[in-house]
Image: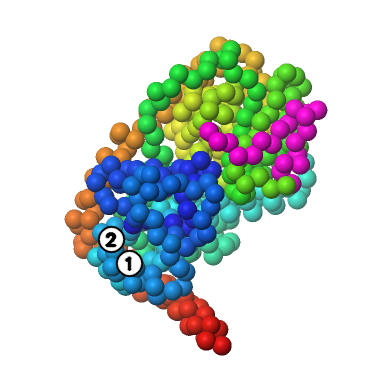
């Protein structure tokens, strides 16, 4: 059973794509898979029945979940984000103590929040501000300013395993937060090898960026494009347009559209891969964030060169060349993007590197069997694994109790209000 923070939307966000890939991986392995969620239904959510996954609407702060999970009696429970583990982890531990509990972080939320705080501090000083390039020691200091890291690491310790999409975040957790390696498993995106014949250089046009507008790093990237990057870039390639796609665009985003500047906020894309495949270059000017980026995975899948910041490209290429360019200032970003757009030999080299990188790091046929084997091994050795995780037992005993009793208090309060 996967307990979702929201219903998965693989065409809207990298988080939704990640959950869809986990569901598919488990189904291929023969697991009976259930997805439980307390969030409201959404217009772009995955049709779970179509992928042979049973959906369950559950309630927060309600003992009906205990009855539900006891009846289901899952062998494995995966929590989508640490806040979901806080809400439901103690209930699963109490009701189904033998179930293997796994946390899927999606990205390290405390890292993203720390970088956002650092960016806001830089923006207050004025000028054209690029991405946050703080070293690990400075990131640790920034992360410690908030209790989010305490909550996130506590959830990691309480679970039997945490799936990490970024090896950068694994290094941070091990070196600065003393998380044992046996509690972490690196599992990036898992994709099928590309089979499509995508358009070549001469049959593509314009620049594109894509991302859920509800995700703060994406909205900040759009603003940086509008204010600093695109004014430089459009003078270098006068015939090109910038197309910005993403689900849930607010009015303040759509109002940025300016045909005279060839800046277009398009909103929802019915087929994100086709949109990216028709563009000549994808732009990913993220100034803060964490995890790895679904938009750059789309670029690799469609052999589309990209220009990305160090934040956007983090943990996605290892020591291999980036399929395009990495730039951390508006001027460099515009320069590299214009070169890729205008110079066909450079474009072709980057396009070929995109597919090479995809095959080296992200193929499902290699990654899925390895993580499922690890899952099976852990299930068979769960007693010893939990015995060795003393801090996990301590966090389960103490830290979870406040969450549990707050939930019970809310439930009782709701009943009293209903009776009145």
* Cα distance in 3D space between marks 1 and 2: 7 Å
Which of the two residues, 122 or 1, is positioned nearer the viewer here?
1
Report the residue at 63% width, 20% height from top: 205
Give the quarter of the image for residue 98: bottom left
Q: Position of residue 324 (x, y in %)?
A: 55, 24
| Magenta span contains residue 265 | yes
Q: How many marks?
A: 2
Q: Position of residue 26 (x, y in %)?
A: 30, 46
Quadrant assignment for the N terminus: bottom left
Image check: 179 left or right of 136?
Answer: left
Q: Are marks 1 and 2 in contact (CB under 8 Å)?
A: yes
Q: Position of residue 126 (x, y in %)?
A: 78, 45
Relative to 385, is 344 above or below?
Answer: above
Relative to 345, is 394 above or below?
Answer: below
**Residue 255 can be seen in this image:** yes
Report the residue at 35% width, 50% height from top: 53
Residue underneath mark 2? 74
Report the residue at 78% width, 33% height from top: 258
Quadrant assignment for the C terminus: bottom right
Mark 2 surroundings: few (<14), some (14-19) or many (≥20) residues within 10 A: some
Q: Which residues are magenta?
A: 252-271
Report the residue at 47% width, 75% height from top: 407
Q: Position of residue 338 (x, y in %)?
A: 67, 21
Mark 1: secondary structure: helix
Mark positioned earlier in the residue sequence (1 or 2):
1
Residue underneath mark 1? 69
Mark 1 surroundings: few (<14), some (14-19) or many (≥20) residues within 10 A: some
Q: Residue reaching furthest right?
A: 260
Image check: 338 left or right of 176?
Answer: right
């Amino acid at each position: 059973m996967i307990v979702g923070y929201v219903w998965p939307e693989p065409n809207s966000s990298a988080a939704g794509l990640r959950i869809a890939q986990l569901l598919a991986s488990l189904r291929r392995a023969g697991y009976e898979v259930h997805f439980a969620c307390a969030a409201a239904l959404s217009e772009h959510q995955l049709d779970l029945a179509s992928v042979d996954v049973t959906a369950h609407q559950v309630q927060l702060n309600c003992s009906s979940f205990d009855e539900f999970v006891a009846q289901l009696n899952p062998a494995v429970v995966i929590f989508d984000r640490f806040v979901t583990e806080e809400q439901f982890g103690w209930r699963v531990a109490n009701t189904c103590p033998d179930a293997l509990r796994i946390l899927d972080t999606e990205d390290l939320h405390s890292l993203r929040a720390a970088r956002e705080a650092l960016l806001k501090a830089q923006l207050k000083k004025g000028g054209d501000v690029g991405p946050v390039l703080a070293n690990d020691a400075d990131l640790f200091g920034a992360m410690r300013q908030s209790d989010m890291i305490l909550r996130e690491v506590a959830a990691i310790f309480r679970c039997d395993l945490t799936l990490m999409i970024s090896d950068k975040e694994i290094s941070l957790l091990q070196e600065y937060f003393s998380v044992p390696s046996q509690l972490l498993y690196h599992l990036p995106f898992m994709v099928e090898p590309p089979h499509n014949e995508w358009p070549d250089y001469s049959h593509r046009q314009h620049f594109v960026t894509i991302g859920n507008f509800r995700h703060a790093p994406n909205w900040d990237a759009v603003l940086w494009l509008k204010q600093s990057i695109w004014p430089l870039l459009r003078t270098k390639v006068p015939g090109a347009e910038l197309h910005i796609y993403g689900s849930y665009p607010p009015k303040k985003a759509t109002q940025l559209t300016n045909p005279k500047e060839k800046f277009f906020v398009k909103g929802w894309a019915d087929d994100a891969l086709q949109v990216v495949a028709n563009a000549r270059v994808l732009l990913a000017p993220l100034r803060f964030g964490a995890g790895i980026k679904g938009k750059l995975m789309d670029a690799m899948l469609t052999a589309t060169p990209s220009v990305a910041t160090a934040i956007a490209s983090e943990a996605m290429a290892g020591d291999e060349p980036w399929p395009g360019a990495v730039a951390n200032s508006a001027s460099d970003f515009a320069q590299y993007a214009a070169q890729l757009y205008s110079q066909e030999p450079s474009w072709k080299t980057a396009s070929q590197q995109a597919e090479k990188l995809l095959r080296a790091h992200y193929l499902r046929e290699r990654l899925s069997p390895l993580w499922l084997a690890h899952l099976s091994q852990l299930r068979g050795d769960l007693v010893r694994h939990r015995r060795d995780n003393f801090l996990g037992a301590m966090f389960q005993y103490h830290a979870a109790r406040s969450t549990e009793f707050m939930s019970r208090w809310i439930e009782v309060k709701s009943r009293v209000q209903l009776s009145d």
